[in-house]
Image (cartoon, coloured by chain):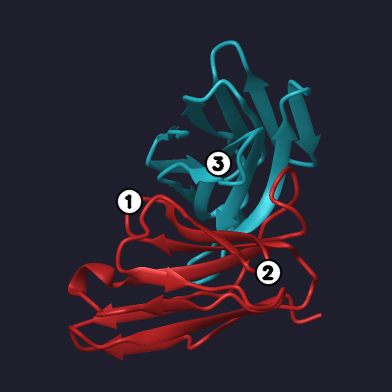
Chain colours: A cyan, B red
Amino acid sequence: GENVEQHPSTLSVQEGDSAVIKCTYSDSASNYFPWYKQELGKRPQLIIDIRSNVGEKKDQRIAVTLNKTAKHFSLHITETQPEDSAVYFCAARPANDYKLSFGAGTTVTVRA
Amino acid sequence: NAGVTQTPKFQVLKTGQSMTLQCAQDMNHEYMSWYRQDPGMGLRLIHYSVGAGITDQGEVPNGYNVSRSTTEDFPLRLLSAAPSQTSVYFCASSYSGALDTQYFGPGTRLTVL
């Protein structure tokens, strides 16, 4: 099955700086890569996703890049704000499978 | 729409007890799934369903049963609770399993003593 690895496990950034989280996946058939944000005590919520026919996608301060050759994808948060503090999960799903495999998560802390 | 709902929010069990975690969605989603979340391990898939009457195992199915008699409901049964099943359980649904957004319920925090 799909195996997703996520780094770093924790990330502390100064408010206004950028944060980058990287994930690798094992199954070359994966074609859907969502990112979820989970605030303390809350449910995971989708913040952005990318499909395999696209190399980059942006939504305001958030961007995701995908390198299918290297089998890795990254989340970039620019101009970080205190409300960006949360746990972020990457995930991957093969084209021939319904199952979504998650990374272990990155705890992001934005220092004021 | 209420979205994805789960009950109870919190539960404490003794080892060997059984119980059912409830999950329901009102979005007419075909795909539903159960995950458990443990510190440092992300979200691990327990069981999933691609439609009423169809269920399949995920990554960590042992000790859990599911059924899908209706599109709306997808209960998770713990047959004989063990301390290793102490976790936060999330139910999720999507319109289809393929490229659609998966929506999560609020979670159930289960402690097994």
Vertical placement of B92 versus B71: above or below?
above
* Amino acid on which the number 2 mark rests in the picture: Ala
Discs 1/2, front: 2
Disc 3 designates what residue? Answer: A91
Q: Position of residue A26 (x, y in %)?
A: 47, 24
Q: Is residue A80 visible?
A: no
* Amino acid on which the number 1 mark rests in the picture: Gly
- Crowding around mark 1 (Cα neighbors within 10 Å: few <14, some 14 to 19, many 20+) is few
Spatial CA distance of label 3 from label 2 is 25 Å
Q: Is residue B102 visible?
A: yes
Residue at 74 percent across and 43 percent down: it is B99
Spatial CA distance of label 1 from label 2 is 33 Å
Mark linked to residue B40? 1
* Amino acid on which the number 3 mark rests in the picture: Ala
Residue at 80 percent across and 42 percent down: it is A60
Tell me which chain the residue with mark 3 is part of: A
- Which image quadrant is residue A7 in? top left
Vertical placement of B44 versus B7: above or below?
above
Disc 2 designates what residue? Answer: B52
